[in-house]
Image (cartoon, grey):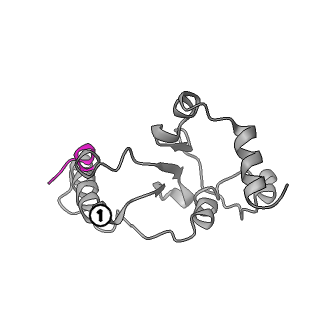
């Protein structure tokens, strides 16, 4: 079994790009993760995550604790991950809000490769990026 960091290094695919959301609807604590996962490592990655979950939980069989599915339309999936948004703001982002319960930790986050420090290091400018996106899509 290959460890997660070794998978990335062996395949030379760079650090994982992901965003996550903790949820607790009706006491069903779980984490939704949206991650780019190249086809070349998908099976190895699933095996490694399964092994990690079994180790952390102390169980030999984690049942259906791990669900993976393709996200052909990441924008729609992103809305699903963000459905715990405050209802006051949901309409502005075209999201159907849902009561995702209380969590005792940070509700959402990103992998370090797309985090604030990485964006600053890369010289990313939010306003310039938004303007370029609007121009590319014919809005300016």
Query: How many marks are shown on the rendered structure?
Result: 1
Residue 17, percent from left and from top: 45, 49
Q: Quadrant of residue 106?
A: top right
- The one nearer the camera, 14 or 31, is 14
Image location (x, y in percent) of residue 4? 26, 48
Q: Residues within 10 Å of mark 1 (few under 14, many from 20)?
A: few
Question: In which quadrant is the N terminus drawn?
Answer: bottom left
Q: Nearer the viewer, residue 37 or 56?
A: 37
Up/down of 39 relative to 13, above or below: below
Does 65 sit left or right of 123 as displayed? left
Residue under pointer 1: 40
Residue 4 lies in the magenta-colored region: yes
What percent of the width, then of the height, locates residue 45? 28, 58
Task: Look at the image and give the residue range highlighted in magenta.
Answer: 1-7
Query: At x 39% / y 59%, what residue is drawn?
Result: 37
Vertical position of residue 13 compared to residue 117: above or below: below
């Amino acid at each position: 079994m290959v460890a997660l960091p070794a998978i990335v290094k062996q395949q030379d695919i760079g650090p994982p790009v992901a965003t996550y959301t903790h949820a607790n609807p009706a006491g069903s604590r779980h984490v939704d993760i949206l991650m780019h996962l190249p086809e070349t490592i998908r099976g190895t990655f699933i095996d490694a995550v399964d092994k990690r979950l079994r180790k952390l939980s102390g169980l030999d069989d984690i049942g259906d604790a791990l669900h993976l599915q393709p996200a052909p339309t990441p924008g729609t999936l992103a809305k699903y991950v963000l459905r715990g948004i405050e209802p006051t703001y949901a309409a502005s982002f075209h999201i159907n809000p849902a009561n995702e319960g209380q969590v005792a930790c940070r509700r959402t986050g990103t992998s370090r490769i797309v985090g604030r420090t990485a964006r600053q290091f890369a010289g990313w400018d939010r306003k310039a990026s938004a303007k370029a996106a609007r121009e590319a899509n014919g809005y300016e």
